[in-house]
Amino acid sequence: MSEETVLMAQGLKKSYGKVRALRGVDLEVPRGAIFGYLGPNGAGKTTTIRCLLDLIRPDSGTVRVLGIDPQADPVAVQARTGYLPGELQVDPNMMVEGALRYFNALRGNKADWGFVRQLTERLDLPLKPPIKNLSHGNKQKVGVVQALMHRPKLLLLDEPTLGLDPLMQHEIYRLLREAQADGATVFFSSHIMSEVEAVAERVAIIRKGVIVEVAETASLINRALRRARIRFKQAVDITPLASLPGVTVLSQDDSTSVTLQVEGEMDALMKALTTFPVSDFETERPSLEEIFLAYYEDDQKEE
Amino acid sequence: MATVFRYTLRRFRGQILGWGIALALLAALIVGIYDSVADQQAQFEVLLESYPPELMAFFGADDVATSMFAPEGFVSAEFFSWMPIVIGIFAVLMGSGLLVGDEEKGTLDLILAHPLSRTLLFMGRLLAFVTATLGILFIVWLGFVVTMNWSTNMNIGWGRVCLPLLALLAELLLFGALALLLSMVLPSRRMAASVAGVVMVASFFITSLARIDERLETVAKLSPLNYYQSGEAIHGLNWQWVGGLLLVTMVFVLLAWWRFWRRDIRVGGEGGWRLPSFSRLRLRRGQSQRPPEPSLSARQRPSDRGEGGGKLRRRRQAVLLAV
């Protein structure tokens, strides 16, 4: 493991009885990255993160967090890590401020309270009400603040924007970028692609306990399928287009318009189209969401 | 650990005051009643002698006519004899929920992600439990001491009232530790509390019945309440019994700690197990027949994919409108 790798997992396996939650996860997160961990519910995202913090013990495999084996020295890992659980629960009878002070006390009062106030103000989180009176979104903010407040070297966030409105989501993205600028590494899980697309530089896609893809977010989008919608001035026979390599007809509303899916480069299609009476041509890069759904669909076909 | 201790004890505050004050009032009432009972001792003796001796033996008042009207015998029969299963409810509920309560609520996950070893969390909470139990017994003791001051006949002395409370403490810690251990082994807090509660009540009955039926004496040797002196401790505490109970408590605590230190912290029931039941088996069969559920949120169903996401579809509709 190099100096620049903050988080490493090799052959990580974990079963709950008959359920095989992780079937050999390999992961490397470089220092200073914002790393997205993408997968549908139940793919093993939460299990991975909880293994990293020694909340659960993997059946086999190696884990290193900031160079430390979490099973050998969990406290050292936990002291350097900010964690937001996927299903955040805080003692409902505590006040927001009381809960934050309690979490801070558990960390030996490391956090600068001025920074905590700054965070709560930015997230518009009231300090006085008891946790039980908070909306889901506000509760989530408590979780975000406690994860960030001690300026950890590594942030492990399980679905950080869950239940937050779009404005707050963007505020969280800003906070994550600021943490990154401060030198922190951010590892966050999500099942919402637009979120990962918005903030992560690299992404790992997990499906059924196995990492199926690790790539730069941008390259993942570039590499994938594109979609082209073409309208023609008059009715045409599109067979020559459909037979091009890498081209599939997605839908044809009538003989004057067609939607195609193009794998790889557009060159062949563009050249073929010169012989057609094109009135309108529109292409769209797929969102990460669609790429992700492609992985997800393969998965369903397997079953 | 100090933080954990303080925080846990603060959560116990209501329990300490509730149990403590209620039982201290009961203690005061018993001291008060004793004054009037002692005045009419002769009539009561006649009444009690008419009861079947087995019944009196069951409640641990064999030579009732003589002992029951001594202050020690009275507080023993009226208070200390059944306190283990009364405050035992507190011990069992708190012991079983000491860690698993938070685990089931889901709050333990985040707490343990803090730089705090499991051992320290365990010790902090255990100490808070012991302190809370001591707190309850202290308030009860105060109830005795204050009312005995005013009483004309009850004159046990504040020091000697401590002794049966110490015997009681040993029992409570034992049942608390048992519940804690069971909560680490069994799948749910409720089950741990139920089993520990059943053990406690069974122990009470076995020990009581063994006084009537000699055949039960061998079994009763395994019953924790067999080593509970009740009010007799006023005459001198059986330190061997208290020591033995504390030793067993320590064993339970060590086993519970070992288990807690090694196990997975559950969220959402993963890693738990249940006793198989018919309804569960049926459910499982039903599940295997159901097609796999797409676990994405509704707007991201794969069926949308052919036409692209919502944005794409809207744009397409716009295109169609333009046509």
Image (cartoon, coloured by chain):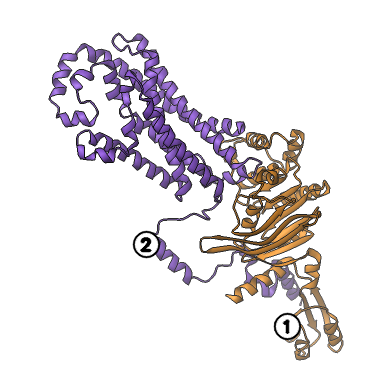
Chain colours: A orange, B purple
The residue depicted at 19 percent of the width and 13 percent of the height is B40
Q: Amino acid at mark 2?
A: Phe
Which class describes the residues within 10 Å of circle 2: few (<14), some (14-19), or many (20+)? few
A249 w.r.t. B30: above or below = below
Residue B91 visible somewhere in the drawing: no
Q: CA distance from mark 1 to mark 2?
A: 50 Å
Q: Which residue is mark 2?
A: B278
Quadrant hosting residue B21: top left
Mark 1 vs mark 2: same chain?
Answer: no
Residue A280 visible somewhere in the drawing: yes
Q: Secondary structure at mark 2?
A: helix
* Chain label for disc 1: A
Q: Which residue is mark 1?
A: A248
Which of the image's four quarters has the N terminus of chain A? bottom right
Q: Is residue A51 left or right of residue B125?
A: right
Rendering coords of residue B246 (x, y %): 43, 32
- Which one is nearer the viewer's eye here, A243 or A155? A155
Quadrant hosting residue B240: top left
Rendering coords of residue B267 (x, y %): 55, 51
Which of the image's four quarters has the C terminus of chain A? bottom right
B203 w.r.t. A31: above or below = above
Rendering coords of residue A114 (x, y %): 76, 34
